[in-house]
Amino acid sequence: MKVLKQLEKQLVVSCQALEDEALHSSFVMGKMATAAFQGGAAGIRANTVTDIKEIKNQVNLPVIGIIKQDYDDSAIYITPTLQEVKALLHTDVDMIAIDATNRKRPNDEQLDLIVDYMKKHAPDVALMADVSTVEEAATAADLGFDCVSTTLIGYTDETEGKSLSDNDFSILKELVEKISIPVVAEGKLDTPSKAARALELGAHFVVVGSAITRPQIITKTFSDTIKDVNQM
């Protein structure tokens, strides 16, 4: 797909701010995407229809769209149902990312039916599977996803306490070796060297979020270190 070619070996910046965060605003996320573009980002990952539309108005970059939505009957949070997928298709988004873990989906929806809908109604929009394990990635490839991302490592019961960069990115190495579709590195890539290492190991592209676009988290790394020094 065109978007995968555009993003190959590049940096995608995740521009997101949830409702309880100080920067929550489509206007601000549009400016954040502009800053990411000025810094060399090749693409943007964004949450919500309004943010995506604003970002599309501000920068001429591929956008990976998601909608984060809570449901009472499921832990799945990233584009959980067909309803969110349909909403994203009204944004001129280039790729849609979906939680493709093996957990129960809201309303017992089936992931294969969501993929089938996409292939039928929006074949030119790429599909990214956010996964936490090699097994989930293999299933996503079989279902017809265009790429898989390591987004959810550490965020499922099965991977609690794990990180993408553990043991010099051992899970990324395994994914690249075993999975037939492009593998995207995302999740706690909090230094430029980690992002570069992921690309060296075969990641198709890297997605970096909090280390670039969440100032409250960036500030906390500084303040915590200063506190440690003051307690010595």
Image: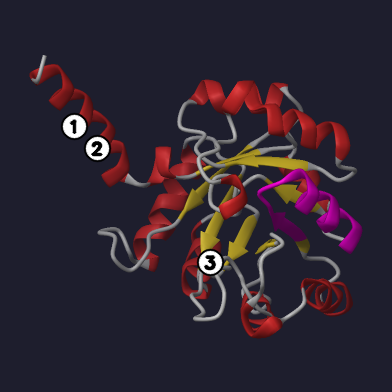
The residue at the point 54 percent across, 55 percent down is: 59
Q: Which residue is mark 3?
A: 52
Q: Which residue is mark 2?
A: 219
Q: Quadrant of residue 41?
A: top right
Position of 179 compared to 161: left or right? Answer: right
Q: Residue furthest top?
A: 232
Considering only order in the chain, which callout, 3 or 1, is on the residue closer to the N terminus?
3
Of tags 2 and 3, the one toward the viewer is: 2
Residue 163 inside the magenta-drawn segment: no
Q: Which residues are magenta?
A: 127-143
Q: Amino acid at mark 1?
A: Ser
- Front-most of residues 35 and 44: 44
Cα–Cα gap, marks 2 and 3: 26 Å
Secondary structure state at the residue bearing disc 2? helix
Relative vertical location of residue 55 with respect to residue 210 in this rendering, above or below: below
Quadrant in the picture for the C terminus: top left
Residue 91 drawn at (x, y percent): 62, 74
